[in-house]
C-alpha cells in the first residue's frame, strides 16, 4: 500500500494547486476514500506542513497503516483469528458442560444404587430358627435339579424370570444393574435389594411345604405383599457365573397391566364406571399396603401397573420390591429423581403414582376410553374429582387421607355408564378427531408413571465405564 501512496503523492500535490486529480483505481476502495480525505484536509490548510509528499505519506501511513488493516473485518488474518478463538471458546464451553453433566449424573447414579438400610439386620434374615436353612437348601436342590423344566416368562436388563409349576424364579445378572445391598456390612458379598425387602415385608412363607403341593390356606401370607419361598446363589448355565435366585409363588392373574388388556379385549368389556365400582375396594387395599410400608419408614419408588399383581380377580398385591428405599435415601434428592418430576417426599410420591396406576388401569380396560378422556379434564366425574383434588397439594397427601377421600367420591351408579361425549360429537369430524387425539395424548401423559435414567447413563458414560457402585 505504501508504494501506491508514494506514486500518488506528486499527483496529489498538483491537485492541491487546482489541477484535476483522480485516485488510481488500483487502490482498494477504502484507501481511495482516505486519500480524498487527506487531500481535502491538506487543501484547506489544516495540515501542519504542505511542503512535501513525505508529510502526506507519513500522515496517510498513520491513518491507513498496519494497525488499521488489523482492525478491518475484511482482513483474512482477522477472520482467521476470530474463527479460531470462537472455535476454541466453544470447545472449552462444551468440555466444561460435559464435565458438569458427567459428575452430576455420576453422583445421581451413585445415589440411585446406594444401599437400602432395613431395620432388621441381614443376619436375622439368614438365621431364621429351626427348619428354615435346611428347607431352603432342600428347595434349592429341587429347583436346580429341574432346571431343564423351567420356562422363560420374560427377560430384561436385570435378569430373567422363569416359571416352574406354581413358582416363579427370578435371576439377577451379575454386572448389569449393581446389587445395592451387602449381606453383611463387614463383607463385600452383595445381593439384590429385592431379597431383603421381600423378607422384610413379605416374610418367608410356605417354605416348609413341598414344591409340588398346592397350598390349602394362604391366609398366613402377609396382606398386600408377595410372599417369598426361597432365595439362593447358583451358577448360571450360560455364563458360568454365580447368580442370585429369588423364588416366589406364581400369581395366576399376572399384573394389573395384563388384567386391563384381558378385560378390554373380552367380548363385552365394561365401562370405566362399572370397573370403578368393582375395583375401588382393591384400590383401597393397595393404599393400605402402601400405608404399612410408609409407616415402617420405606417407599416402594416404582408403583406402576406392571408391579401390581393380581392374586385373585380383586385381590391385588404389591410386587417387585427391588426399588424399595428408606425415606431418607439420597436418591430422593438426586438429579434423576427431580428430572422425572417426582415429589421430594417419596411417600406422597408413592400415593400419587398409585392413583395414576389405578386410573390408568380403568382407562386401559374400559370400552369407553373417549368418555373417560372427555370427563377427565372437565372434573365432573368422581374419578377426575378425586385425582384433581389430590393434585391441588400433592406434597401433603398420604395413603390414609387418599383412602378417606376416595370413600367420599364414590363411583357413579352403574345405570349412568352409557353416557357419551355428545358435546364433542356435534362438531365436524376432523375437528373432533383432532381434539380427541390431543386429549388422549394429554391424558396418557398425565397418567404416565414410567421413569427414565437414559440421560444419566449417557452423560455419565456408564455405557462404557459401567454404573457406579456405592459402598455398603
Image (cartoon, rainbow, N blue to C red):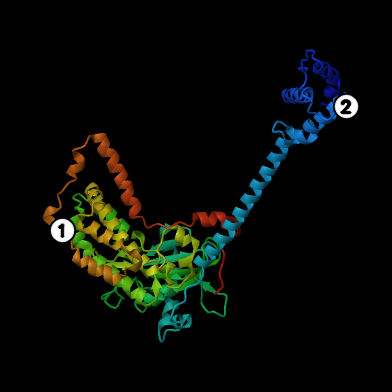
Q: Residue furthest bottom?
A: 130
- Write down the residue under mark 2: 54
Q: Work out which quarter of the rendered image holds the N terminus and state it.
A: top right
Residue at 55%, 66% in the rendered image: 241
- Write down the residue under mark 1: 412
Residue at 82%, 16% in the rendered image: 17
Mark seen at residue 58: none
Which residue is at the front of the view, 381 or 314? 381
Q: What is the crowding at mark 2: few (fewer than 14 residues within 10 Å), some, or many (at least 20)? A: few
Above/below status of 43 relative to 193? above
Above/below status of 422 relative to 37? below
Residue 146 shows up from this direction: no
State the SS at label 1.
Answer: loop
Looking at the picture, how far across and down is residue 102, in whole percent? Answer: 58, 58
Q: Residue furthest left?
A: 415
Q: Is residue 313 left or right of residue 95?
A: left
Q: CA distance from mark 1 to mark 2?
A: 103 Å
Residue at 23%, 65% in the rendered image: 314
Eye-nearest disc, 1 or 2: 2
Residue at 36%, 63% in the rendered image: 303
Residue 24 shows up from this direction: yes
Q: Is residue 218 left or right of residue 464?
A: left
Q: Is residue 424 left or right of residue 102?
A: left
State the SS at label 2.
Answer: helix
Which residue is at the front of the view, 121 or 326? 326
Q: Quadrant of residue 252?
A: bottom left
Looking at the picture, how far across and down is residue 361, in whole percent? Answer: 28, 57
Q: Earlier in the sequence, mark 1 or mark 2?
A: 2
Which residue is at the front of the view, 13 or 369? 13
Q: Residue furthest top?
A: 20
Amino acid at each position: 500500500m505504501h508504494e501506491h501512496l508514494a506514486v500518488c503523492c506528486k499527483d496529489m500535490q498538483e491537485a492541491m494547486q487546482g489541477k484535476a486529480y483522480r485516485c488510481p483505481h488500483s487502490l482498494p476502495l477504502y484507501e481511495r476514500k482516505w486519500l480524498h480525505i487527506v487531500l481535502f484536509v491538506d487543501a484547506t490548510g489544516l495540515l501542519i506542513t504542505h511542503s512535501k509528499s513525505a508529510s502526506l505519506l507519513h500522515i496517510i501511513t498513520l491513518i491507513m497503516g498496519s494497525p488499521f488493516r488489523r482492525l478491518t473485518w475484511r482482513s483474512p488474518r482477522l477472520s482467521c483469528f476470530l474463527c479460531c478463538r470462537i472455535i476454541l471458546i466453544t470447545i472449552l464451553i462444551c468440555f466444561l458442560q460435559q464435565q458438569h453433566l458427567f459428575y452430576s449424573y455420576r453422583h445421581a447414579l451413585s445415589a440411585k444404587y446406594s444401599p437400602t438400610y432395613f431395620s432388621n439386620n441381614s443376619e436375622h434374615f439368614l438365621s431364621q430358627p429351626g427348619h428354615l436353612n435346611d428347607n431352603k437348601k432342600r428347595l434349592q436342590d429341587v429347583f436346580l435339579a429341574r432346571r431343564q423344566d423351567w420356562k422363560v416368562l420374560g427377560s430384561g436388563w436385570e435378569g430373567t424370570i422363569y416359571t416352574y409349576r406354581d413358582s416363579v424364579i427370578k435371576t439377577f445378572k451379575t454386572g448389569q444393574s449393581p446389587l445395592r445391598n451387602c449381606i453383611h456390612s463387614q463383607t463385600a458379598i452383595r445381593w439384590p435389594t429385592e431379597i431383603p425387602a421381600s423378607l422384610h415385608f413379605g416374610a418367608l412363607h410356605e417354605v416348609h411345604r413341598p414344591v409340588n403341593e398346592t397350598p390349602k390356606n394362604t391366609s398366613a401370607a402377609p396382606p398386600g405383599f408377595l410372599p417369598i419361598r426361597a432365595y439362593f446363589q447358583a451358577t448360571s448355565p450360560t455364563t458360568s457365573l454365580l447368580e442370585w435366585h429369588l423364588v416366589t409363588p406364581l400369581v395366576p392373574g399376572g399384573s394389573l397391566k395384563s388384567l386391563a388388556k384381558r378385560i378390554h379385549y373380552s367380548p363385552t368389556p365394561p365401562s370405566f364406571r362399572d370397573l370403578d365400582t368393582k375395583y375401588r375396594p382393591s384400590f383401597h387395599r393397595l393404599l393400605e399396603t402402601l400405608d404399612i410400608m410408609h409407616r415402617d419408614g420405606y417407599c416402594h419408588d416404582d408403583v406402576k401397573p406392571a408391579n401390581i399383581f393380581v392374586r385373585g380377580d380383586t385381590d391385588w398385591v404389591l410386587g417387585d420390591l427391588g426399588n424399595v428405599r428408606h425415606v431418607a435415601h439420597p436418591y430422593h434428592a438426586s438429579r434423576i429423581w427431580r428430572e422425572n418430576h417426582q415429589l421430594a417426599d417419596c411417600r406422597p410420591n408413592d400415593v400419587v403414582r398409585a392413583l395414576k396406576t389405578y386410573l390408568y388401569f380403568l382407562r386401559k380396560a374400559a370400552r369407553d376410553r373417549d368418555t373417560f378422556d372427555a370427563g377427565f379434564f372437565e372434573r365432573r366425574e368422581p374419578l377426575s374429582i378425586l385425582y384433581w383434588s389430590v393434585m391441588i397439594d400433592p406434597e401433603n397427601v398420604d395413603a390414609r387421607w387418599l383412602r378417606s377421600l376416595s370413600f367420599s367420591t364414590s363411583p357413579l351408579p352403574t345405570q349412568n355408564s352409557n353416557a357419551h361425549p355428545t358435546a364433542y360429537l356435534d362438531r365436524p369430524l376432523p375437528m373432533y378427531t383432532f381434539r380427541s387425539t390431543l386429549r388422549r395424548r394429554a391424558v396418557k401423559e398425565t397418567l404416565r408413571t414410567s421413569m427414565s435414567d437414559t440421560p444419566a447413563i449417557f452423560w455419565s458414560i456408564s455405557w462404557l465405564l459401567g454404573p457406579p457402585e456405592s459402598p455398603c
